[in-house]
Amino acid sequence: MNRPALQEFKAGFFRALAHPVRIRILETLSTGERSVQELQQALDLDQPVVSQQLSVLRARNIVEPRKVGTTVRYTLSDPLITKLLAIAREIFNNRLVGTQSMLKELQRETRK
Amino acid sequence: MNRPALQEFKAGFFRALAHPVRIRILETLSTGERSVQELQQALDLDQPVVSQQLSVLRARNIVEPRKVGTTVRYTLSDPLITKLLAIAREIFNNRLVGTQSMLKELQRETRK
DNA sequence: ATCTAATATAGAAATATATAGATACTCGTG
DNA sequence: CACGAGTATCTATATATTTCTATATTAGAT
């Protein structure tokens, strides 16, 4: 096999990115390793929410856990994911954005 | 505004890519404009399936229709989408693939 | 005006995903 | 070995997406 399996796999990958919290997690990890707790605080979310979304990303090998004593630290499993997010941002920036205010916010992000 | 709206927007974009048929459509459009019929034949799908998935892509401004008489021809609304798919392919190629057979198929795609 | 080819939309049933809260697990420390 | 901090999983309910099939729309030709 086979085409169908491959296409399903690709779709699964994008589905894993298709969630606001997961995108925020990935964007945070783009700047370096974080523990669950650090993510939780940075994104102001309940702990189970973070763990659960991390487990979705883990299932797709998008993110990698590393145990350090009682904490677990996560990294992107591939630096290209950062690049992918950057290109997505360019696309939004170019023309996919509907509202002025989102455009502004996007440009703020792109600048940094 | 505002953060939440932007993150929702980004998630929506990825959600639009998260479907085997839509990915195949985008990969086909990466090589140039196509009519609905051409897509339908190239991908061996029923007409309503193609139109329906095109409408999902249209809703996100990922794809653009152009009427030519009684047919409608579609293009990617941004060439960066091709680049995005290429990077996704690199990521799969690097390490996200679980099975040998998918890996082979992927490499076949990447080569061309 | 009617017919036909090409495309688009609608509706219903099946399936998948999201969300929130409670609970379970794991590891180091006392 | 019991405890606590940090993580992970489970369950239930709500919501969204997918898939199929039928039908509607649109533009050009007769």
Image: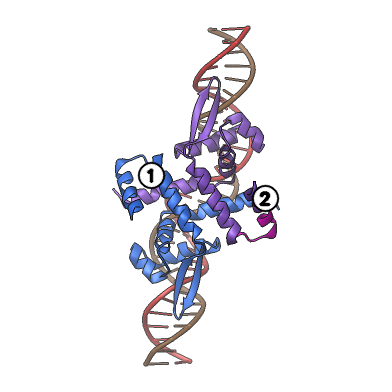
Chain colours: A purple, B blue, C red, D brown
Q: Is residue A11 magenta?
A: no
Check the image and report above or below for B106 versus B28.
above
Q: Quadrant of residue B38?
A: bottom left
Q: Which residue is mark 1?
A: B93
Note whether residue A18 is visible: no
Q: Chain of mark 1?
A: B
Q: Residue at x 65, y 38 (%)?
A: A43
Nearer to me, A44 or D13: A44
Q: Position of residue A19 (x, y in %)?
A: 56, 46
Q: Alpha carbon of mark 1 to alpha carbon of mark 2: how far?
A: 32 Å
What stretch of residues is rendered in magenta? A96-106
Type of amino acid under label 2: Arg
Check the image and report above or below for A5 versus B43.
above
Which SS does the magenta portion mostly show? helix
In the rendered image, the residue lying farthest to the front is A111
Type of amino acid under label 1: Asn
Q: Position of residue A11 (x, y in %)?
A: 43, 50
Residue C18 placement, left or right of B90: right
Q: Quadrant of residue C13?
A: bottom left
Q: Position of residue D18 (x, y in %)?
A: 44, 54
Check the image and report above or below for C30 versus A23.
above
Q: Is residue A100 magenta?
A: yes
Q: Which residue is mark 2?
A: A108
Q: Position of residue A63 (x, y in %)?
A: 49, 36
Q: Residue at x 63, y 61 (%)?
A: A98
Task: Mark 2: give few (<14), some (14-19) or many (20+) Cα within 10 Å.
Answer: few
Residue A94 placement, left or right of B101: right
